[in-house]
Structures are given as structure tokens and as C-alpha cells.
Image (spheres, rainbow, N blue to C red):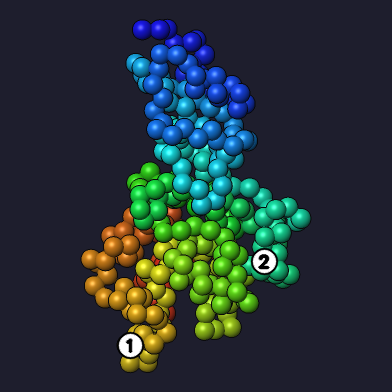
Amino acid sequence: MKQVPKNVGQAITLGVATVLSIVGIAGYQLSHKELVIPRPPFQQAVVVHDARKVQIKYLGNGWYNVGDTIDEEMLDFQQLDTYFTGASIVEGDAIYKRIYGKSYPTNKAVDINNLRYLKMLYVDYDGATRCGEMIVNAKIAGVTLDIFRQLFEAKYPIARMELIDNFWDTDGNTTDQASMHANNASSFCYRTIAGTSEQSAHALGLAIDINPHDNPYVWKNKDGSLKLEMLDAYEQQMLEDREHKAHAITEADLAYQLFTKAGFDWGGNWDNPLDYQHFEWKNQ
């Protein structure tokens, strides 16, 4: 057997040409069936060897885009935090341009400096690893990254995770409906609570919705019955026998356990409305 080069197994900064030279190491079998060279920038590549098998692990999340399907063999699970990152949003930058005039209108309640843009991995309903994005209040950025890292490690299924601006339609509440029907996990959107004039915790980036089409938001009538006419047929069906429904958040669910342990309230425990998708930071 040929000797492994001395630098193999170390974390090294790579350009595409260097990656190609590593891929071409003779006498070893690459672990990827179809190796896709990540687009720069990526922080580092870690080359792991075992007998005649070489695996290239890429750190950081600059080498893939939101929504991309990612080969797990290219991820270093010993350094997962490098794929769960938060960044400030600066007036005029790419994220600001996406949200200004949509989820972030001119307002006096929340300054752009108080928001953070998160990139995170998640496992979708088909079991594929994808890159997601979310904007939250800076107060909860760290705890949010930690929760979603734990959900990813547990392969907790999340249907979709994009900025709500990707579904923009007229105003925040109309857009929220479109995002919910797309089963999109999201947080920040400057809007009121649906059906009221009261400012939503989402307007401050202090609430997070998970798999919303599977976990409806529903008001009660005075007699305690649910206002089902506000929901589509699928949402109505998801309100029945929730303990046995796939993707239904209950108190036995991992998302419920992680969020409530970290200091969030769950809307599924509210009196009226019931908001099964919703986790809201208590320490506002």
C-alpha cells in the first residue's frame, strides 16, 4: 500500500487546484460517487483517510447556496458549528437589499443592527441535507443556532427554510400565509399578529415557526370550538389525532423539548389562538 502524504489528515487552506491534486492521489478510492468541487469561498478542507478510502471534508458554509442539497460525506461532523453561522446585516448589503421594503420596512421598532442572518443545515422530509436561512433577533441568534444544530444532528425533518421574502405578496400577513402554505420555517417579518392590530413577536425576530402547514395556527370560537373555516382541508386534517401525525409538533416532539428547555414558549399550549408551529422567546 502506498504511504499517505504527510499533510493528509491535517486542516489545510485549499484552492480548487489543490483540491483537484488531492482528489487525484493515486492508490486511494474516493468516497464520493460523483464528486462536486465546492465553489469558493470555503474555510478549510480536511482530508480524512482510512485504508484505501479518502474523504474530503469542507468547513464553513460559503461553498453552497440556500436550498442546495449537500452530500453529508463532504461535511465534518466533528466541526458542525462551522455550518451554523450568524452574521450582522448592514444597510446596503445583499441581505438588506433582499428584505428592505418587504419583511423589513422603514420602522421605529426594530433597528437593522438588532437582527442577525443565520445559515444552517437541516434535513428535509426526504432525508436530504440542505442549507437553510433565517433572520432572528440578535438576542436569540446563539440559542437558535444551537437548537437547529441539535435538530440537524438528530435528523429532525424540516420541510423548508428560507427567508419569508422569497414568498412576498403585498404585505407581511399575506406573505406569512404564503410562507405557511409552503411549509416554510421562518422567523423575522415586520407584521402584526394575524387577525389583530397587535405587533407580532415575529416583527422583532423573537419568534420562530417550524413546519407551519403541518402545525396550523387556529382561533377558537366563544364556545371553544375551532374556527376551521380559516384553514384549508389539509390543515384541518392535521388538527385531528396530532399525537399520531407525522411532522405534528406535540410535547413529545424534539423541537418542543429543545425550544422550551432553551426558554421559548410554545403556541400549542396557548388558550386562544392555538399556534402549533410557533416558538416565542419568553425573556423579551
Which tag is nearer the camera, tag 2 or tag 1? 2
Q: Secondary structure at mark 2?
A: loop
> Residue under circle 1?
224
Q: Disc 2 versus disc 1: distance between alpha carbons? A: 36 Å
**Near-viewer residue (100 or 106):** 100
Residue 16 lies, in percent from the top left, at 60, 27
- Compared with 284, 234 (above or below) is below
Task: Tell me where residue 38 appears, x and y as whole percent.
Answer: 55, 35
Q: Specify the label residue 134 is tagged with.
A: none
- Determine whether, in the image, residue 86 is placed left or right of residue 154: right
**Residue linked to disc 2:** 104
Q: Residue at x 35, y 53 (%)?
A: 126
Q: Position of residue 284 (x, y in %)?
A: 55, 64
- Classify 139 as above or below 110: above
Q: Residues within 10 Å of mark 1 (few under 14, many from 20)?
A: few
Residue 146 visible in this rendered orientation of the protein: no
**Is residue 204 toward the left or the right of residue 51 in the image?**
right
Q: Amino acid type of disc 2? A: Tyr
Q: Residue at x 50, y 10 (%)?
A: 6
Residue occupying the far right of the picture: 92
- Determine crowd level at label 2: few under 14, some 14-19, many 20+ residues with C-alpha closer than 10 A: many
Report whether residue 40 is seen: yes
Q: Is residue 148 above or below residue 209?
A: above
Q: Residue at x 71, y 59 (%)?
A: 97
SS at circle 1? loop
Q: Residue furthest bottom?
A: 223
**Which of disc 1 and disc 2 is earlier in sequence?**
2
